[in-house]
Amino acid sequence: MNKPSIYGLTLDQLGAWLEEHGHKKSRALQVWDGLYRQRTSDFGMMNAVKPEVAALLEEHFSIQTLAVHTKQESTDGTVKFLFKLEDGNLIETVLMRHKFGLSVCVTTQVGCNIGCSFCASGLLKKSRDLTSAEITEQIMKVQHFLDAAGKGELVSHIVVMGIGEPFDNFTHLVNFLRTVMDAKGLAIGPRHITVSTSGLADKIREFADLNLRVNLAVSLHAPNNELRTRIMKINRAIPIEELLPAIDYFMEKTNQRVTLEYILLREVNDQREHAMELAELIGDRRPSINVNLIPYNPVDEHSQYQRSDQDAILGFYDELKKQNVSVSVRLEHGTDIDAACGQLRSKQIKRMEKTPS
């Protein structure tokens, strides 16, 4: 039986575990420093950790459970990793370079059941949730990659926008967030972290109640129920009139702005009238909402959708601006590699299925 990953424990949980096994709770800080500051992958190499503590940890935990299966590097510095989990499943993680720092997009599930009709992530249905350890280790694998380059670069931002619906894996998501935000570890501040949801209203409220100060992004992608249901089947269960009050609750509870993500699909949801309808939907929420327009990365299996042309993107943007809506266009990364989320994983699995055993 495989040993659990040490990355699955928060600092408090590690301290409690050590205390249960006859060691001082304070020893957890030394281990934590070895994991997240020294970033060693060997318990025995951790500075200040007593040999008997290192041996105990080695007996009960693993540090490395993810292996790099495939890696694609873009000319813009984006790196897409396809990691192989211990059970053989594949997940995607992406390193992106921005002017403000280095951002990592993590995956929270193996596959996705949300079923957005334009998305590569949902081509393969969810088989299981990732553990908090597997989510955290994605960050650490990318950081180890950066360490090996010897430039002293650090992961500074996290976006939880990879494969899967994060709020459908709520407990592991929260455990992961508490781990990476811990000031004694990676110390990535909550304002440098964004969690994206397709719109699980109850979980948005539950997340607000935790008041983690993490940024929230909601995948809206349409200004009305008819259109949103056509491209996002989750809207049948949680229509816009149920989603918006949950967003309101989050903003009131946390006093934070919310981003509405809107992927532009040619002649589907990208017309000026759609922008006007979106502005009307946002209404008096304008000061607390930012709309992030996302140019579409075409997916072979969803050939009914095409990328909006530049005129349509600019027209949509201009109309929202005219309506006094805060709006931005997402900067694209990795357009010369498998840019769409889930695309690399889907292609790799198809290749494996075609390869004779």
Image (cartoon, rainbow, N blue to C red):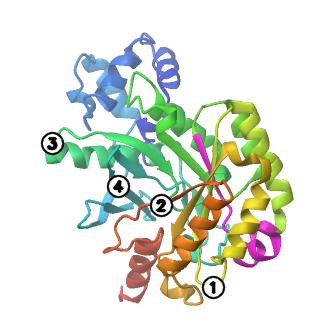
Q: Which residue is mark 3?
A: 151
Q: Quadrant of residue 213?
A: top right
Under mark 3, the amino acid is: Lys
Q: Identify whether 223 is placed above or below 2.
A: below
Q: Earlier in the sequence, mark 1 or mark 3?
A: 3
Real-space CA distance between mark 4 and mark 2, rounded to the nearest whole angstrom: 13 Å
Question: Does residue 288 appear anywhere in the picture?
Answer: yes
Real-space CA distance between mark 1 and mark 2, rounded to the nearest whole angstrom: 19 Å
Tell me the element at label 2.
loop
Real-space CA distance between mark 4 and mark 1, rounded to the nearest whole angstrom: 30 Å
Question: Does residue 202 appear anywhere in the picture?
Answer: no
| Front label number (4 vs 2) | 2
Could you say which is closer to the camera, residue 26 or residue 226?
Answer: 226
Under mark 4, the amino acid is: Met
Real-space CA distance between mark 1 and mark 3, rounded to the nearest whole angstrom: 45 Å
Q: Which residue is mark 1?
A: 267
Rendering coords of residue 143 (x, y %): 29, 44
Real-space CA distance between mark 4 and mark 3, rounded to the nearest whole angstrom: 16 Å
| Front label number (1 vs 3) | 1
Q: Is residue 14 in the magenta section?
A: no
Could you say which is closer to the camera, residue 146 or residue 332?
Answer: 332
Q: Earlier in the sequence, mark 4 or mark 1?
A: 4
Count neighbours of disc 3 (C-alpha within 10 A) and say few if under 14, some if 14 to 19, many if 20 or more.
few
